[in-house]
């Protein structure tokens, strides 16, 4: 009796379908990928002083306190500079920006400011106040230029308001 033997041949790996998939999949994934820009603001905590500081005109320690009904701009040593009451739309960030620009013209070398907020302050309000304090628009000649005002911002909790 004759037996029939099967011819054994080496199996070929068929990868053309996989390569086609990769060729289509890689450009698709790159085209739908979301590339986001992450913005980071460097912040620091206010420094604690160990002793009383001497009050001098050059020694401005700008402090903005966010209250539910107003923004209080002051000097940590000298006291309140101006209280900006809220408008119908919320905190008056435009008036704050103008006041900070005026302070920057009086103290051009100062770059530090402290923003203090109460516990229930909205995040959006805090960011708007920080943006108004960090940078503003300054007129130079005939052009309006964006300039840094007080870029080194420290944040903290507002002191309890005494009534």
Image (spheres, helix red, strand yellow):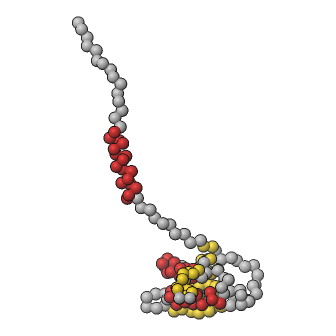
Write the residue at 50% across / 80% down. 128
Q: Is 54 left or right of 75, judged from the image as shown? A: right
Residue 58 x, y percent position in the rendering: 71, 87
Residue 5 x, y percent position in the rendering: 28, 15
Residue 93 x, y percent position in the rendering: 51, 86
The quarter in which the N terminus is drawn is top left
Whether 121 is drawn above or below 141: the answer is above
Residue 161 x, y percent position in the rendering: 59, 88
The extreme top residue here reads: 1
Write the residue at 65% across / 77% down. 46
Q: Nearer the viewer, residue 88 or 137?
A: 137
Q: Nearer the viewer, residue 75 or 95?
A: 95
Q: Quadrant of residue 113?
A: bottom right
Q: Quadrant of residue 48?
A: bottom right
Q: Is 93 left or right of 51, judged from the image as shown? A: left
Q: Nearer the viewer, residue 103 or 122?
A: 103
Whether 79 is drawn above or below 39: the answer is below
């Amino acid at each position: 009796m004759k037996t029939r033997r099967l011819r054994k041949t080496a199996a070929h790996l068929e990868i053309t379908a996989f390569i086609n998939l990769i060729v289509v999949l890689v450009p698709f994934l790159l085209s739908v990928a979301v590339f986001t820009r992450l913005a980071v603001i460097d912040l620091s905590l206010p420094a604690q002083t160990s002793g009383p500081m001497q009050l001098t005109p050059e020694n401005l320690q700008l402090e903005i306190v966010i209250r539910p009904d107003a923004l209080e701009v002051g000097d940590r040593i000298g006291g309140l500079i101006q209280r900006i009451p809220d408008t119908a739309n919320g905190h008056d960030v435009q008036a704050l920006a103008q006041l900070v620009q005026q302070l920057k013209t009086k103290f051009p070398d100062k770059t530090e400011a402290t923003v203090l907020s109460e516990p229930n302050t909205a995040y959006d309000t805090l960011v708007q106040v920080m943006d108004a304090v960090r940078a503003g628009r300054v007129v130079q000649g005939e052009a309006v230029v964006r300039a840094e005002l007080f870029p080194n911002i420290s944040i903290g909790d507002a002191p309890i308001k005494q009534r």
